[in-house]
Amino acid sequence: MKKDSDILDRIDRKILAVLQEEARIANVDLAERVSLSPTPCLERVKRLERSGYILQYAAHLNPNKLNAGLVAYIEVSLKSTTSEDLALFNQTIMSLSEVMECSMVAGGFDYLIKIRVKDMMGYRQFLGEKLAVIEGVRETRTYVVMEEVKATHLLDVRE
């Protein structure tokens, strides 16, 4: 059964939509955009934070200006998928700053990783010095992104 804190109304959804596009918006401006007065608006934002709908606020940086312009997706197959092997791989991947996303997947391989590095040399160093040396990695297959057609953090918050 859903708790009251897990029920979102139209205004909650508007708040979430505005905040995910404009996290630094002042509460007064947010309240105006969602047709509330500032105090109830702030109370709703705090409730959405407490309930876990809002995980964090972040700045989106330009990867090209920060020497991280090359994007690659890497399929990773492990030699073994025991709980211990998966935990070791997960722990190691969490420590690699180049890894933007890592998902365990079902299908022909075990993990799909998204990395950002400066260039092909950066990719080669990541592969040879960081990924391929992780104990248990059997095989990798890489797809280098030629053009990012769509990359977003925005979730559809409509009902």
Image (cartoon, rainbow, N blue to C red):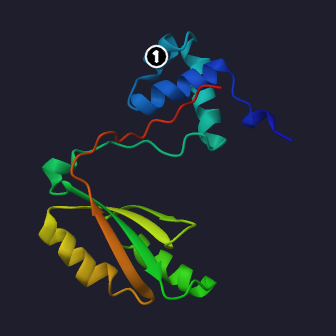
Where the N terminus falls, by quadrant?
top right
Q: Quadrant of residue 119?
A: bottom left
Q: Which residue is mark 1?
A: 28
Q: Secondary structure at mark 1?
A: helix
Q: Considering only vertical position in the picture, is 20 above or below 73?
A: above
Provide residue 18's location: percent of width, then percent of height.
47, 24
* Residue at figure coordinates x 47%, y 70% from the top left: 111
Amino acid bearing label 1: Val
Q: Considering only vertical position in the picture, is 10 above or below 137?
A: above
Is residue 157 among what the camera can see? yes
**Most foreground residue, 117 or 79:** 79
* Residue at figure coordinates x 33%, y 87% from the top left: 133
Q: Quadrant of residue 20?
A: top left
> Most extreme residue toward the front, as rendered?
108
Is residue 97 among what the camera can see? no
Provide residue 138's location: percent of width, then percent of height.
42, 86
